[in-house]
Amino acid sequence: MKAPAFTLKDQSGNKVSLKDFIGQKIVIFFYPEDDTPTCTVEACNLRDNYGLLRNKGLTVIGISPDDTEKHQKFQTKYQLPFTLLADPEMKVIEKYGVWGEKNMYGRKYMGLKRTTFLINEKGQIDHVIRKVDSKKHAEQIVKIWSL
């Protein structure tokens, strides 16, 4: 399946489009919010394994509903080496189908479902990780793309 096209602003306010990455393998991880416990664990796991991911030829991009300013603070605080894209209007989040009903401790509510898309060099979705293990996310990604 072809990955839905998008153009969003990164943590520095620069426009970034999916088409900018044609010819590269891309990891797009959708996460609910900057600087929250689980999102920080996931982002830091990707940061700590960034060299491994880059050695495998993977480009990492994070997308959340947070704005560019909040992304900039999050990136700086945790020295994140990858691009964070702001989707406050949730247009891309909805295109990728990662907004929906969640259930925590029996309470149902609407929110962003932590999901990662592995997109090949042709812009097609090779795999979707719906059960993200935040503490071992880089390992999940490498294992899938090594098959």
Image: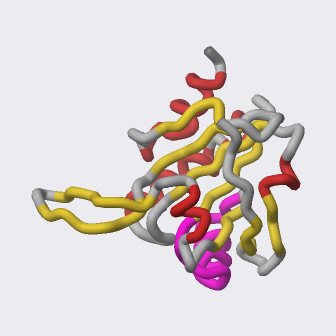
Q: Residue furthest top?
A: 147
Of residue 103 and residue 137, the one placed in the foreground of this image is: 103
Q: Is residue 100 left or right of residue 115?
A: left
Residue at horizontal 49 percent and vertical 54 percent from the top: 97
Observer-nearest residue: 124 or 20? 124
User: Residue at (77%, 37%) from the top-left corner?
Assistant: 25
Secondary structure character of the magenta stretch overall: helix
The x and y percentages for residue 106 are 10, 58
Q: Is residue 69 magenta?
A: yes
List x then y, in percent, for residue 32.
45, 65
Closer to the camera, 84 or 75? 84
Q: In the rendered structure, which segment of residues is drawn in magenta? A: 64-81
Q: Position of residue 48 (x, y in %)?
A: 61, 46
Q: Quadrant of residue 104?
A: bottom left
Q: Is residue 65 above or below residue 100?
A: below
Residue at far bottom of view: 69
Residue at the image point whose x is 65% and y is 35% from the top: 1
Asked if residue 50 is positioned above or below residue 142 in the image, the reply reads below
Q: Quadrant of residue 109?
A: bottom left
Furthest-left residue in this view: 106
The residue lying at 84 percent from left, 48 percent from top is: 21
Q: Quadrant of the C terminus?
A: top right
Instruction: Tell me if residue 60 is in the magenta stretch.
Output: no
The colour style of the image is secondary structure
- Left or right, residue 32 beside residue 4: left
User: Is residue 103 shown to the viewer in this render?
Assistant: yes
